[in-house]
Amino acid sequence: MLVAARRARQIATGGKDPMVDVQNDKPTVTALREIEEGFVTAATLEQAELQAQEQQEHVEFASVASILSDQ
């Protein structure tokens, strides 16, 4: 259930695109359908969040490096 809640939140507010046809479904129903069809698991959700965090850190480090090199 926690996986469905996290995924529904991603779809509703996180700007993540659904992996199944939405068909006028609410984000919670869409998330449950994604889980049912095997597109989303706890492991894939965790992996995607780690990748997003690593990418954000990389962007931030590059920005800091750019600022420091300009000085």
Image (spheres, rainbow, N blue to C red):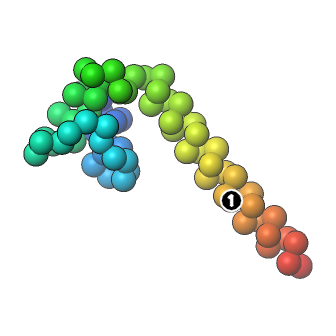
Q: Is residue 71 visible?
A: yes
In front of the other: 50 or 33 = 33
Residue at image location 89% in from the left, 79% down from the top: 71
- Residue 17 in percent (x, y) is at 34, 47
Direction from residue 3 to residue 49 in the image, left or right:
right
Find the residue positioned furthest to the bottom.
Answer: 71
Find the residue positioned furthest to the left.
Answer: 24
In front of the other: 26 or 22 = 22
- Residue 11 in percent (x, y) is at 31, 45
Please tell me in which quadrant of the rendered image residue 27 appears.
Answer: top left
Please tell me in which quadrant of the rendered image residue 22 appears.
Answer: top left
Residue at image location 39% in from the left, 22% down from the top: 41
Find the residue positioned furthest to the front.
Answer: 21
Q: Which residue is mark 1?
A: 60
Direction from residue 63 to residue 8 in the image, left or right:
left
Q: Is residue 2 visible?
A: no
Is residue 17 depicted above or below 7 in this figure? below
